[in-house]
Image (tube, rainbow, N blue to C red):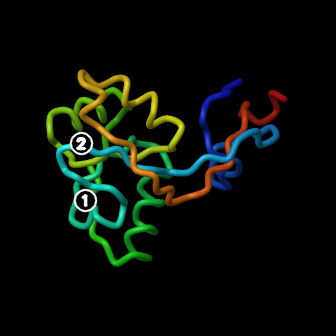
Amino acid sequence: MLVNDTSLTRSRTVGRGFHFGPIYFYDGQGFMVPRALHVTKAAMLDGATVCVQHGTTTVLNLTDFARRNHLRFTPVVIEDLRGAVSALAAGRCDVISQDGAGLATTRTMLRNPGDYVVLPDRISKEPIAPVVRFGDD
């Protein structure tokens, strides 16, 4: 059983054979940026490179948001969260994007958390639910 911040999606249910329990939380994808960029909202991120974690819905949400708001983003897909945080700290990307609840925890992984700010925008609505393999109910 996985009880984390896993979004219930059709592709995870049908394509991967996962079975989701009841939704217990709604989250939304957000952004964290270095304070030095003086960015206060997601609409100011036009042209930014964005670190995202591989195997998540983050890139799809980012693409939809960019299209709706006439923005350009360059996703930098990183295998895992630690790698994405390291890439942000090293300047390989301008911003990191993931579910909002996770951003607060991600911020604490940085050497100087006060040098980063979580933007107030949420660009998706993510239904969070526990998950098990299909047939393992």
Residue 107 falls in image quadrant: top left
Quote the CA–CA distance across marks 2 and 1: 17 Å
Residue 41 placement, left or right of 8: left
Q: Quadrant of the C terminus?
A: top right
Name the spot of residue 44 as percent of width and height, x first: 28, 64
Q: Secondary structure at mark 2?
A: strand
Name the spot of residue 26 as percent of width and height, x first: 67, 47
Question: Label 2 belongs to which residue?
Answer: 34
Identify the residue at horizontal 56%, vertical 51% (top origin): 28
Identify the residue at horizontal 30%, vertical 32% (top origin): 85
Residue at the farthest left position: 91
Question: Label 1 belongs to which residue?
Answer: 74
Along the line of sight, the residue nearer the viewer: 129 or 25: 25
Q: Secondary structure at mark 1?
A: strand
Residue 14 placement, left or right of 84: right
Crowd band around label 2 with a 10 angstrom C-alpha radius: few (<14), some (14–19), many (20+)? some
